[in-house]
Amino acid sequence: MAKIRMTTPLVEMDGDEMTRIIWKMIKEELIEPFVDLKTEYFDLGLKERERTGDQVTIDSAEATKRLGVAVKCATITPNAARMEEYNLSQMWKSPNGTIRAILDGTVFRAPIVVKGIEPYVRTWKKPITIARHAYGDVYKNMELRIPGAGKVELVYTPADGGDEVRATVHEYAGAGIAQGIHNLDDSIASFARASFNYALDTHQDLWFATKDTISKTYDHRFKDIFAEIFAAEYKERFDEAGIEYFYTLIDDAVARVIRSEGGFIWACKNYDGDVMSDMVSTAFGSLAMMTSVLVSPKGYYEYEAAHGTVQRHYYKHLAGEETSTNSVATIFAWTGALSKRGELDQLPELVDFAHRLEQATINTIESGIMTGDLAAITSMENPSRVNTHDFIRAIAERM
Ligand code: NAP
Ligand code: MG
C-alpha cells in the first residue's frame, strides 16, 4: 500500500514523562506505517526547555503561526519539586500559557464518547464541548483585605487627561474584603470569534451564558459583544449551516445542559469554564478521554490531550513495572491535527485516514479491549484490561 502523502508539515511539539513514551508509539505504530508523515519537530520536554531557556516553546508557537496546525504532547509545568528533580535554573512558565499568549487562542475541550463508558448524566448521548475564555476576571484580579471601617472605591483615570470617574464599591462599617476584576473588549471579541468559527467548523450549535441580569455592565458587555459580532459576521453563515447561536442566563444554561442530549459547544466565561469543564469531563467518564484544541481568531489550531504527563505511571514505568496508560486523547490530538491539515491542504485521503484511526480506536474499546482506567468504570462485562503498549498494538491490528 502506498503511503498517504502530506504537503505541509505539522508542527510537532514533543513533551514529557509517560505521554512522551506514548507519543513515540503512536507515531511509529499508528501513523508512520500509513502516512508519509511530515512534521517540524520541537522538543518541549523539560530538559530541552531548560537547555534553550524556554526559547523552544516560543519557536514552536511561532512555527504554528507559519504552518497553521500543531499537535502537542503533554508537558511538565515546573513547580518546586520539579526544580530539584530537573535541576532547573528557573521555574519555567507553563508551555500552554506561553503558546496561548502567542497565538491568542480559545481552548475547546471535548470528550470522546464510546459505548460502554456511559456518562453519569443519562440524557447525554453526544459530546459537550466547552470553550473557556482564558483571560481576565478573577484570574487577573486585585484583592484587598479591609481591616476596619472605611470606603472602597473604583477609580478610572483616563490616559488622555479627561475627567476621573469614581464609583463607591462599599462603605465599610467594619472589617471585610474587596476585589477588583477587569476584562477587555478585544479579548472578549477574540473569544466570541473563536467560538463562532469553531461552531461552524464542527457544525454544532453554540451556547453562551453570563449573569447579565445581576452584572448589568460587566457581564452585559460580554453578551453585547457576542450579539454584535454574531449579527454582523456570522448570522448568515450559521443559517446556511443550519446551526444556532443560543444565549441564556448561566443558571438556565446549567439546567439545560443537564437535560440536553449534548452535541453542542458551550462557551463559558473564565471562571464558569474552569469549574464546568471539570464537571463535564468527570461526568463523561474520564479525563483520559478528553481532547483539547486551541483555536486562534486568525485560524491557527493546536491539538492536545486535556490530561497531563501521567507522572505516577511514568515512575512505575521507570521502575520496570507494567503500566496501563490510556493513549486515546493523545491519539485524537494527532487525528485532529492530521484531519485539519488534510482539510486545509485539500488532501481527502489524509482526512479519511484520521477518521479511520479514530474509528479503529473507538472500535478497540467497544470490542472490550481497554486500559485500566476504563476497565474500572466500563458498563461492559469482562473487559480485557491491557497494558499501555498492547492497547496501541490492538488499534494497529485493526488499522
Ligand atoms: P495527570 O497527568 O493528568 O494525571 C493525574 C492522574 O489522572 C494520573 O495519575 C492517573 O490516575 C489519571 N490519568 C490522567 N491521564 C491518564 C491517562 N492518559 N491514562 C490513565 N490515567 C490517566 O496529572 P498530574 O499527574 O497531576 O500531572 C503530571 C504533570 O502533568 C505535571 O507536571 C503537570 O504540570 C502536567 N500537566 C500538563 C498538562 C498539559 O501539558 N496540558 C495538563 C495538566 C498537567 P491514576 O494515577 O489514579 O492512575
Ligand atoms: Mg478547573
Image: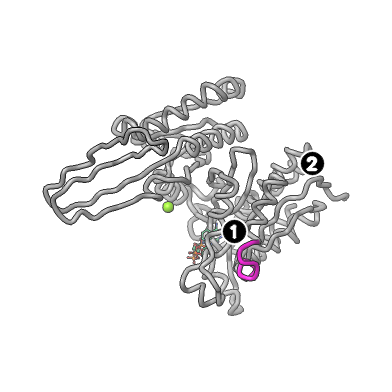
Q: Is residue 342 left or right of residue 44?
A: right
How many C-alpha atoms fall within 10 Å of the one at disc 2: few (<14), some, or many (≥20)? some
Q: Is residue 246 left or right of residue 33?
A: left
Identity of the residue drawn at 73% across and 38% down: 344
104 versus 312 height, above or below: above
**Percent position (x, y) of residue 341?**
73, 43
User: The magenta stretch spans which residues?
Assistant: 47-55
**Percent position (x, y) of residue 308?**
54, 60
How many C-alpha atoms fall within 10 Å of the one at disc 1: few (<14), some, or many (≥20)? many
Would you identify the image quadrant in which residue 208 lies? top left
Disc number at residue 349? 2
View extreme (bottom): residue? 319
Q: Is residue 298 magenta?
A: no
Residue behind mark 1 = 370
**Contact? badges 1 and 2 (CB < 8 Å):** no
Looking at the rendered structure, the kind of residue marked 2 is Glu
Identity of the residue drawn at 73% across and 50% down: 10
